[in-house]
Image (tube, rainbow, N blue to C red):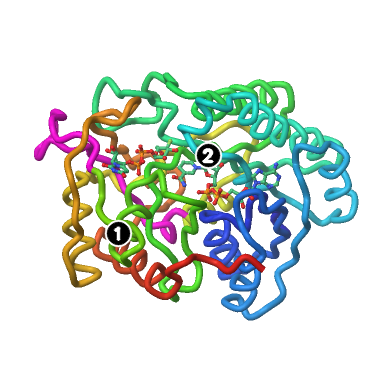
Amino acid sequence: MRILVTGGTGYIGSHTVLALLDAGYDVLIADNYVNSKPEALRRICKLAGQDVPFALCDLRSEAETFKLFAENTDIEAVIHFAGLKAVGESVHEPLLYFDNNLKSTLNLLKAMQEYGVHSFVFSSSATVYGDPASLPIREDAALHVASPYGRTKLMIEDILRDVAHADPALRVSILRYFNPVGAHPSGMIGEDPNGIPNNLMPFIAQVAVGKLDYLPVYGDDYDTPDGTGVRDYIHVCDLAEGHVSALKALTAPGVYTFNLGTGHGYSVLDIVHAYETACGHAIPYAIKPRRSGDIAACFADPAHAREGLHWEATRGLADMCKDSWNFQHNNPDGYSND
Ligand code: NAD
Ligand code: UFG
């Protein structure tokens, strides 16, 4: 069974490609390298011990997307990671986000309809829950978004519900990721952000390796045990395996929505201290004002995924930090540019 993995050279996509190959699926990656590099593909192939098929394709182009399906008529399912994901950038460039994330998804859904592909797994985000009224967050919690990025996720979820309503053959799995961190245990693939990282763990990783001087901790006056923000960090390899489980579970038409998280909340300072243990030295940090748009705490109720996907995260915080550090230490400047 061949799976089209859009965004398959990106952070989560690259780990998922390896999990799919491990589970015996054939894969076709489609990416335009807007936020990833050919070096990621070379490393995926090396780790997989095979040439993984790749198509350079900008999914914003309907013609390119249709050509992809016309040339690969064995595609049986799509896992759609491709998208822009920087919350702050989306506030300044909303049209870029609506254009890229919505158009890509519409083109894929049209091509799937044309070529009779009925299974679709979508990368959504816990950002669709906004500031949750209660914790842990269940899938039936109210949805609110605070950024254009978040709005693209919610709009795509709504589009998928409408399209599936009109197409009785369509099988859709919406996966709402909490905070993916860590890297493949080989240290060969991991997160390779452009410029200064926006997210906590890649920022800490660059402080740990000496590329950044200290971590700004955005707020220590939240209503949390130590006053810093609490999130549900999930190892990217657990997340990747969650996609394999979601694909296996997609046996009947309809739209199925799952949280992919661990159910445990850790504070910013918990992460700093766990990382210090992983890298063997102190991580300098300084308390700064709260970051605009941040919430105090966010963690998943993972019960629905456990029951519906027969999947749960197995790797703990120590593994997340160890594997992040292993990748950062082996690749202080990320992937090469050639
Ligand atoms: P990433 O940026 O590393 O990977 C996304 C990939 O999509 C990149 O390789 C990029 O080049 C590609 N891409 C983007 N637009 C494209 C287009 N028009 N055509 C072809 N390829 C295109 O991001 P990631 O962290 O791996 O995230 C994957 C998905 O998961 C995204 O949809 C993201 O919004 C979602 N998500 C990520 C997080 C997170 O914290 N990393 C959390 C929740 C949801
Ligand atoms: N933080 C710092 N300093 C930093 C970066 C982050 O203190 O330099 C804090 C934040 O204030 C927050 C926590 O670390 O309390 C986590 O922040 P991240 O930026 O790593 O993650 P967020 O929870 O803010 O957002 C992430 C993704 C979103 C996604 C959301 C839910 O960036 O795209 O998780 O999945 F929507």
For mark 1, give the secondary structure: helix
User: In this rendering, would 98 be left or right of 185?
Assistant: right
Question: Up-down: is 158 above or below 272?
Answer: above
Tag in front: 1 or 2:
1
Which residue, given by chain and number where applicable, does mark 2 sit on? 85
Q: Position of residue 328 (x, y in %)?
A: 39, 67
Going by the numbered disc 1, the residue's amino acid type is Val
- Determine which quarter of the picture holds residue 294: top left
Going by the numbered disc 2, the residue's amino acid type is Lys
**Quadrant hosting ligand 2:** top left
Q: Position of residue 204 (x, y in %)?
A: 30, 56
User: In this rendering, would 212 be left or right of 252?
Assistant: left
Q: Nearer the viewer, residue 70 or 35?
A: 35
Tell me, yes or no, if residue 1 can be seen here: no
- Determine which quarter of the picture holds residue 254: top right
The residue lying at 42 percent from left, 19 percent from top is 144
Which residue, given by chain and number where applicable, does mark 1 sit on? 207
Question: Up-down: is 226 above or below 28?
Answer: above
- Magenta-highlighted residues: 217-239
Tell me, yes or no, if residue 218 can be seen here: yes
> In the displayed image of the protein, which residue is found farthest to the front?
213
Q: Position of residue 90 (x, y in %)?
A: 53, 30
Magenta residue check for 221: yes
Magenta residue check for 153: no
Q: Nearer the viewer, residue 254 or 72?
A: 72
The residue lying at 27 percent from left, 44 percent from top is 263
User: In this rendering, would 338 be left or right of 324?
Assistant: right
Ligand 2 within 8 angstroms of badge 1 C-beta: no
Ligand 1 within 8 angstroms of badge 2 C-beta: yes
For marks 1 and 2, the one nearer the N-term is: 2
